[in-house]
Amino acid sequence: MDLKEHIALKQLPKHIAIIMDGNGRWAKQQGLIRAIGHENGTKSVRQVVEASAELGIQNLTLYAFSTENWNRPKLEVQTLMKLLVSSLKKEIKTLQDNNIKLTAIGNLGTLPKKVYKELHEVIDNTKHNTHMTLTLALSYGSREELLNTVKEISIKVKNNIISVEKIDESIINEHLYTRNLPDVDLLIRTSGEQRISNFLLWQIAYAELYFTQVLWPDFTKQHLYEAIIEYQKRERRFGKTSEQLS
Ligand code: IPE
Ligand code: IPE
Ligand code: MG
């Protein structure tokens, strides 16, 4: 049975974010090196990108590399960066064919030159695409993002561009890396870990959280459908009572 048929297309989450976790454990289970886990993880990326585009999800954000991941062994970081360049090269056609716009959030200046260049090439080549926005979180940390936001707003206050009284949630939103994206509706984390690991802390304030034991390289379109079906069963009350909603 295809789970896709059980999805209500009129109630799709506008923004799905995924913490793609478990590549290392997947490899270990098969007696393989971690790099092979990361390589197989890219297949799952393709699965969720395609499935999201087919369904009509407007925004998909993938946590690919955190600020904390820089502390991994040098060789693993290198492997991940190389994989990123090769995936970008390989997937540009998929993005164009599906009318998908690629964007990135994070401290992108810290990425190796080669990655930065390839990334910006794909971002530039897909910037007019309109069907879906795919955002890669790269060298991304939510606390760093919030810190930058505070600094940028402070400078504007100091230079009399904004008054303190005018600072509200929308001003904060406009200064985040995610300024062009709506709040996250559904946050998925694979591999059984139940934590946020410094991802989109502000943006997930009212997101529905979905944790699955499935390791990222095993994650398929059907798993994404399962998550969306579960999301659609939940009642999002935003502080109100159930009666107020009906
Ligand atoms: C996710 O898989 C990929 C990145 C964080 C870059 P991991 O590499 O964290 O896999 P585990 O958690 O060690 O299994
Ligand atoms: C979170 O996974 C970051 C990414 C998926 C890119 P980690 O594997 O780095 O998270 P922790 O360290 O287990 O919290
Ligand atoms: Mg992990």
Image (spheres, rainbow, N blue to C red):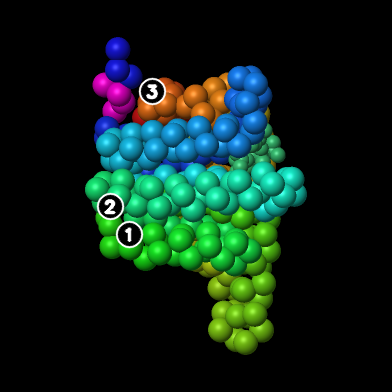
Q: Position of residue 201 (x, y in %)?
A: 61, 48
Q: Nearer the viewer, mark 2 or mark 3?
A: 2
What mark, if any, has residue 96 been given in the picture? 2
Is residue 7 one of those drawn in magenta? yes
What element does badge 3 sit on? helix
In the rendered view of the protein, which quadrant contains the N terminus? top left
For the question of whether residue 91 can be seen, the reply is yes
In the rendered structure, which segment of residues is drawn in magenta?
A: 4-8
- Label located before the other in sequence (3 or 1): 1
- The disc at residue 126 is 1
Q: Which residue is at a point 58% across and 21% down the rendered structure image?
A: 213
Q: Residues within 10 Å of mark 2 (few under 14, many from 20)?
A: some
| Tag shown at residue 33 | none
Q: Residue furthest top?
A: 1
- What kind of secondary structure does the magenta stretch mostly adopt? helix
Figure quadrant, ligand 1: top right
Residue in the image at 31% along x and 46% along y: 94
- The response on whether ligand 2 sits within 8 Å of label 2 is no
User: Is 201 above or below relative to 212?
Assistant: below
- Toward the viewer: 217 or 14? 217
